[in-house]
Image: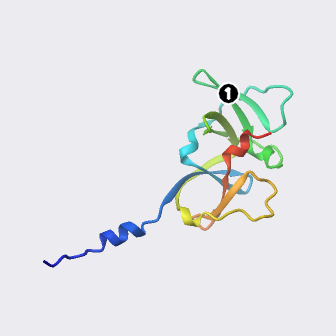
C-alpha cells in the first residue's frame, strides 16, 4: 500500500513556538511584556499618591474594588518623569501591579527563538531579553517579576 506524505507532519514538527507581547513606549524605548501576564490596559486612570515610598512607586488605583499599586517604568529606569498616560495592569505571580507607561504601542507575536538574552553588562535587571520587531525596531522584554523586588 502506497502512502502519500503531503508534508504536513514534517511542517507540524517544524512550527516554531511563538510568544505574544504587548509593546509599550517609555521615552524612546519600546518595551514588551508577555500577554499572559497582562490583565488590562487603562487610559487616564487617577492614581492616588502614597507617602514614604520610593519615587518610582506612583501610588495606588482602585480597580473594581481592588487596590492595585502603580509603578512608573520611567522612574524605575532612572529616566525623568513625563506625561505618562497609560497603566498596564499585570498579574505577577498572583499579585496585581500597575505599570505607568507613556503609551501602549502594539501587540506582536514573536518566535521564541528570536528573543535574545540581554548583554552581561545589563545592570538594570528589569529587562530579561530583546528582539527585533516586524517593523524593524527593537523591543526589550520586561522581567515583570523584578518589579516586585525592592
Decide: is 64 above or below 88. above
Residue that protrudes farthest toward the front in the picture = 1
Quadrant location, the C terminus: top right
Residue that protrudes farthest toward the bottom in the picture = 2
Query: Residue 4: horizontal and vertical position, in percent?
Result: 20, 76
Residue that protrudes farthest toward the top in the picture = 65
Which one is nearer the viewer's eye here, 86 or 61? 61
Query: Residue 104: horizontal and vertical position, in percent?
Result: 61, 47
**Could you say which quadrant of the image residue 48 lies in?**
top right
Disc 1 marks which residue?
A: 61
Query: Residue 73: horizontal and vertical position, in percent?
Result: 74, 45
Residue that protrudes farthest toward the left in the picture = 1
Is residue 122 shown left or right of residue 37? right
Decide: is 58 above or below 129. above
**Residue shown at 73%/57% (left/top)?**
28
**Residue shown at 61%/68% (left/top)?**
136
Q: Residues within 10 Å of mark 1 (few under 14, many from 20)?
A: many
Decide: is 54 above or below 74. above
**Could you say which quadrant of the image residue 144 lies in?**
top right
Query: Residue 116: horizontal and vertical position, in percent?
Result: 64, 65
Amino acid at each position: 500500500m502506497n502512502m502519500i506524505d503531503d508534508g504536513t507532519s514534517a511542517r507540524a514538527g517544524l512550527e516554531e513556538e511563538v510568544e505574544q507581547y504587548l509593546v509599550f513606549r517609555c521615552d524612546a524605548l519600546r518595551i514588551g511584556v508577555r500577554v499572559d501576564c497582562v490583565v488590562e490596559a487603562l487610559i487616564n486612570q487617577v492614581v492616588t499618591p502614597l507617602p514614604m515610598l520610593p519615587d518610582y512607586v506612583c501610588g495606588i488605583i482602585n480597580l473594581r474594588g481592588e487596590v492595585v499599586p502603580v509603578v512608573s517604568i520611567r522612574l524605575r529606569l532612572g529616566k525623568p518623569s513625563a506625561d505618562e498616560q497609560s497603566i498596564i495592569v499585570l498579574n505577577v505571580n498572583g499579585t496585581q501591579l500597575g505599570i505607568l507607561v507613556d503609551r501602549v504601542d502594539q501587540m506582536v507575536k514573536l518566535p521564541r527563538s528570536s528573543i535574545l538574552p540581554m548583554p552581561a553588562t545589563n545592570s538594570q535587571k528589569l529587562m530579561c531579553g530583546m528582539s527585533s520587531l516586524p517593523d524593524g525596531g527593537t523591543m526589550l522584554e520586561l522581567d515583570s517579576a523584578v518589579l516586585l523586588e525592592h
